[in-house]
Image (cartoon, helix red, strand yellow):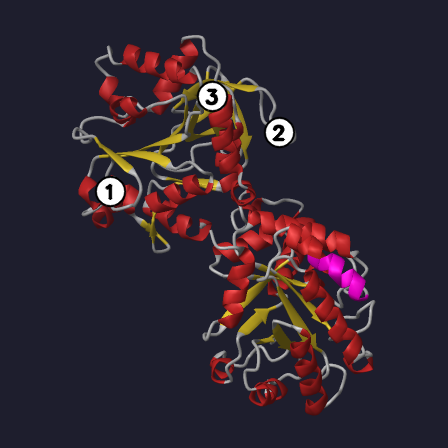
Amino acid sequence: MTKKTKLLRNLLNKTSLEFLLEAHNGISAKIAEEAGFEGIWASGLALSAQYGVRDNNEASWTQIVDMVEFMADATTIPILLDGDTGYGNFNNMRRLVKKLEQRGIAGVCIEDKLFPKTNSFIKGEKQALADVAEFSGKIAAGKDSQLDEDFCIIARVEAFIAGWDMKEALYRAESYRKAGADGVLIHSSLPNPSQILEFAQEWANRSPLVIVPTKYYSTPVEAYRKAEISMVIWANHMLRGSVHYMQQIASTIKTKKAVTDIEDDIATVNEVFRLQGADELAAAEKRYFNETAQETRAIVLAASRGDKFAELTENRPKAMLPINGKPLLSRLTDRFRKANVKKIFVVSGYKSQSINVPNINLVENLDFESNRELASLNLAQTHFNEDMIILYGDLLFRGYVLKGLLESKRELTVVVDSSKRSKEQEGDNDFAFCSVEDNRELWGQDVLLERIDTKPEHKGRDCSGRWVGMVRVHGTGRDWIETAIDELKSLSTFDNLDLGHLLNKIIDNGHPIRVIYIHGHWLNVNSLGDLEHARSFM
């Protein structure tokens, strides 16, 4: 594997224009690499901001180095540290280079201002610059102390920022090049690239030239290519983007006192785990603990045409009806994959050949016209395991509903919507009767399912809500389901049974089924009215 220092040097010396993206911690660095960037700019502004302090050397150099070490550990691409002024004199610079090399950082950029520095865009023209000879000595000390010949030191020229002219900028850049700098970063606070392009012309490629177009960001990058600039740094956009969206999310949560409206639009906890390397840890645990973990599966029952949709389902099953341009089944599988449920089995029937959703496994029910959901589930038994979700294929729901099911470790768990206690439309007949009524306060309370019925009243009592057609199966819950199916198969009415009958049989066999209450936030698509509602729901 090529050294990170060599990778950075190669980027600097390429004849093509190269780009670095700012990152300020391990997770942002990993995101930058996954986006395709070949190098990272560890911005002084961003590193200070993520600590909540000013860009005035208020974060110590050891705190900065500690953070970039985490960034280096999280990535395989080179990191160029914004090293401010080198955190002191030539001796501080020597120690900085030593520590950066030890921690896998590919290079450092230092600027010719006085310590402690102030951000270039805060009263720039009033900032004093370092003595040229002293700063050149700092560069030379850094080069003399490095052990890796490819470690890069970039000299950042602040002459334009401080109000000096082209002559001074060129004089400083040339002095730093002669002192051993591997490249020059020329900075400008103008809203256009005039100073930068003029400098590039005068510099004439004496050494790699780096720019940071924070103020003149609208300039087409082709202008930089023509000027033979080596590298562009997008210096603070990851930080600014995260601040913007965190402010929006914080405001929304404070206003609504809930997270339901934002949960589906932000990264899942599983995505955070992925960026943290949870998969690698799980693989290591499997290797070193010698344990076999079950992969969560989904069994989707989607064999029906959907007779209420007339010509809309003439050439496709109900599960392939488009919701805002995307098939219902695709939205369902997307929801599973976002929850890290990747093994998905779909029991199809009507117009099975029209189902073209990627990365699913089809189980065909050839007798779909004469049987119902329980017969479809029976066909999928060969794909059962001890960790799965069974559900109807016409469902839409918010992400937290599935998350709550997946977090349950009870043998069987179902979701009941306590907001729906009456029959609202034709075909809605999964009324749930539970051991405890929902009070919308005790999340995770120990509630058991007592019966699924086709009417909202049962034995003189009102229902507790509507059963959402989803079942979470864990551990021996699989055995309970398989036993109940085998017993029901002996009935002449088996082909007319659905999942509600299965749940009732399991209860009759003496097994508990846990209930998780919700209050709305789901929809089953049974009619044209439901289809219209689904478009606004999504």
Residue beneath the point at 57% across and 85% down: 200
Give the answer, above or below, for where 317 lies relative to 251.
above
N-term mark: 2 or 1: 1
What is the CA distance from the residue labelled 3 to the residue labelled 2?
Answer: 32 Å
Q: Main secondary structure of the magenta part?
A: helix
Residue beneath the point at 42% across and 39% down: 336
Q: Does residue 374 show up?
A: no
**Type of amino acid at the residue the image marks with label 2:** Trp
Q: Is residue 421 on the magenta stretch? A: no
In depth, the one of 187 and 245 nearer the eye is 187
Disc ID at residue 291: 3
N-term mark: 3 or 2: 3
Crowding near the residue tagged with mark 2, few <14, some 14–19, many ≥20 C-alpha atoms within 10 Å: few
Q: Are marks 2 and 1 in contact (CB under 8 Å)?
A: no
Which residue bears the numbered disc 2? 443
Crowding near the residue tagged with mark 1, few <14, some 14–19, many ≥20 C-alpha atoms within 10 Å: many
What is the CA distance from the residue labelled 2 to the residue labelled 1?
Answer: 37 Å
Which residue bears the numbered disc 1? 317
Q: Is residue 93 on the magenta stretch? A: yes
In depth, the one of 197 and 459 nearer the eye is 197
**Type of amino acid at the residue the image marks with label 3:** Glu
Q: Which residues are magenta?
A: 89-97
**Type of amino acid at the residue the image marks with label 1:** Pro
